Amino acid sequence: MNITVEGKQVEIPAEATCGDALKAGLSGKRFKATVAAQAGDALLDLSAAVPAGATELTPVLLESPEGLEILRHSTAHIMAAAVLRLFPKTKVTIGPSIATGFYYDFDPVRPFTVDDFEAIEKEMRRIVEAAEPFTRSVEDKTASIARFTAKDEPYKVEIMGDIQDPTVSLYTLGDFIDLCRGPHLPSTAFAKHFKLLSVAGAYWRGNEKNKMLSRIYGTAFATEAELKAYLHRIEEAKRRDHRKLGRELDLFDFHEDVAPGMVFWHPKGMLVRTILEDFLRKEHLKRGYELVQGPQLLRRELWERSGHYANYRENMYFTEIEGDAYGVKPMNCLAHMLIYGSALRSYRELPVRYAELGVVHRHEMSGALHGLLRVRQFTQDDAHIICTPDQLEAEIIGVISFIRDLFTLFGFSYKIGVATRPEKSIGTDADWERATKALIKALEKIDIPFVINEGDGAFYGPKIDCRVTDSLDREWQCSTVQCDFTLPERFELEYVAQDGSRQRPVMVHRAILGSLERFIGILIEHCAGAFPTWLAPVQARVITVTSQHDAYAESVCARLRLAGIRTETDLRNEKLGYKVRAAQMDKIPYVLVIGDKELEDEGVNVRLFGGDSLGFKTLAEVEALIREDSEAPFKRGGMNYRFS
């Protein structure tokens, strides 16, 4: 029969495998890099027969996303085979590929530790060097259940009990047989570049009532260079971990015994927050927003009216006051609508833009809490724009411009997605369609590329999601712009139109940085704790060579503080080198050294974070230098900013 391979027609025998067909149509080098075949939407082993009726086969290369997933899934099987050779009484469960690698859950005699990794990796390398084939077979489910029952593999038997088909597919690797859909690598020889990373406890099927298993995480790449680069990023991420840097820089702490998922801000961390909050308030005022604030508690009836109680209550906290039920607010939109509805508005007053740095609470499972990145109490840079339908597009564009300005300022690149109606939602199809089209039209008008994220919208409306990319190429969800026709209807919001009629406005829910806690955590990791000068809690530290210079150092510190520069002194009786290194460890942007010459000439010797020395500067020059450094990021982003 004839089949097309990358535009080339090849003739193959009727009993040919996918590997035979691809080998006939590809160069030797390209075929050697091929690990599977694609026929339509189906991914197939190279050993699989060419599907009946197939007219075209596409090679799946090891370096492709699909090939990488197959590599990692296959490496999970290799790891399981190695574990069973070393620890034969271990019971196996599942071993999928994940975004950054793979894992396998085991039920061992004793929990695995990282100390076991050396032996497991050594055995895995033996399997790889032996180039053992992955062999697929299809077996009657009843026979397969008997097989795994005899092998004392209860987890596999339980999985097969959920399979409706009368047959199951198995993959054999040496003496290891696993229940799996596949496909897999042609042989273990392709899986040369792997590393075991960590081990953790995991309940079987994620149910805390089930047995705790040992989950071993690993990763695999097509090349050694890619693996090394990934391992370097992991080490760099550990170095930049905001929880570690938060303690080292004395920014914040957590006390899980008394307030799990809630942050205790120390003076320096609170100063960073305050600077950021003040900046955000000023930016909102410049862009025509009005500052408001709503209460922490609202009656349950209000949350029922909004739809939050039916669609979001598992994420909320509730309490009772004098027999009445109240919800602790997880978001600020209800209070803002009540503020809008406190008076009858004219079309001439619209758009109304209410902004609030509002503290909100959301229920998170204890296992999901993660430093500043996932907390139960946080502050949102929240705002709600209430406008006429004709104003909607311009308002969305204004929000996107705000997003673009702020992320440029902080040095983040970003990607945009439009999230559509989820299964659990409120509102009419017509309103959802209008809202979705408005978001898409605004993005198209300003020529910003985006993807559609089906079913990821909020329960009351579609949204634009902005994912920023940090200095380690990790993506983080931050900004959101949500278009809502439904809540204005439920809360009977109105405005008087030009013709005197009462009309229904539309509401835009938006957050730029999102949760301030989360954003600060992301920013700490992005800049490795070295905040830009304008945001650094301490911009300059004055250090002395001997105690004879202390009085002058105090006067320098006082002058810089009067100029609005956040300055402190280090007058400890320590060697100069020690104090300079301490300032570097504390990531102070400017270190101002005072010795005899500086005292005599009424200046300082300036050293920058990172080690560069600018030499002697007068105090006026230091003020100008720090002022210029603080304003520079804003000028690059085209934003007006005056240092103060």
Image: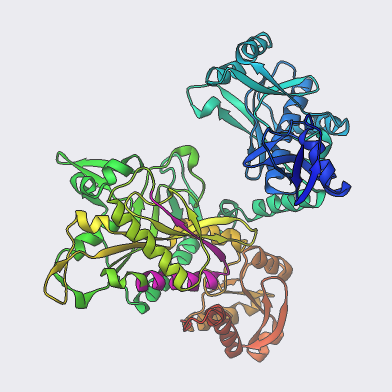
- Using the image as rendered, state which of residue 568 and residue 196 is in the foreground: 196
* Residue segment shown in magenta: 394-421
Residue 412: x and y, percent? 57, 66
In terms of image quadrants, where is residue 573?
bottom right
**Which residue is painted at 18% across and 62% down in the image?**
493
Most extreme residue toward the left, as rendered? Answer: 500
User: Can see residue 61?
Assistant: no
Image location (x, y in percent) of residue 9: 78, 47
Q: Position of residue 597 (x, y in %)?
A: 71, 86
Total residue callouts: 0
**Residue at 74 percent of width and 35 percent of height:** 75
> 500 or 636, which lies in front?
500
- Residue 342, image quadrant: bottom left
Q: Is residue 106 above or below residue 462?
A: above
Using residue 283 as the reference point, say whether residue 569 is left or right of it: right
- Left or right of residue 346: residue 392: right
Instruction: Name the image quarter holding residue 87.
Output: top right
Query: In the displayed structure, would residue 605 be above or below residue 293?
Result: below
- Residue 164 visible within the image: yes
Specify the farthest residue to the front: 1
For the stretch drawn in magenta, the main secondary structure is helix
18 lies left or right of 302: right
Instruction: Name the quarter where the N terminus is drawn.
Output: top right
Of residues 390 and 237, which is closer to you in this image? 390
Q: Is residue 119 magenta?
A: no
Q: Nearer the viewer, residue 415 or 573?
A: 415
Name the residue at 68% across, 27% down: 112
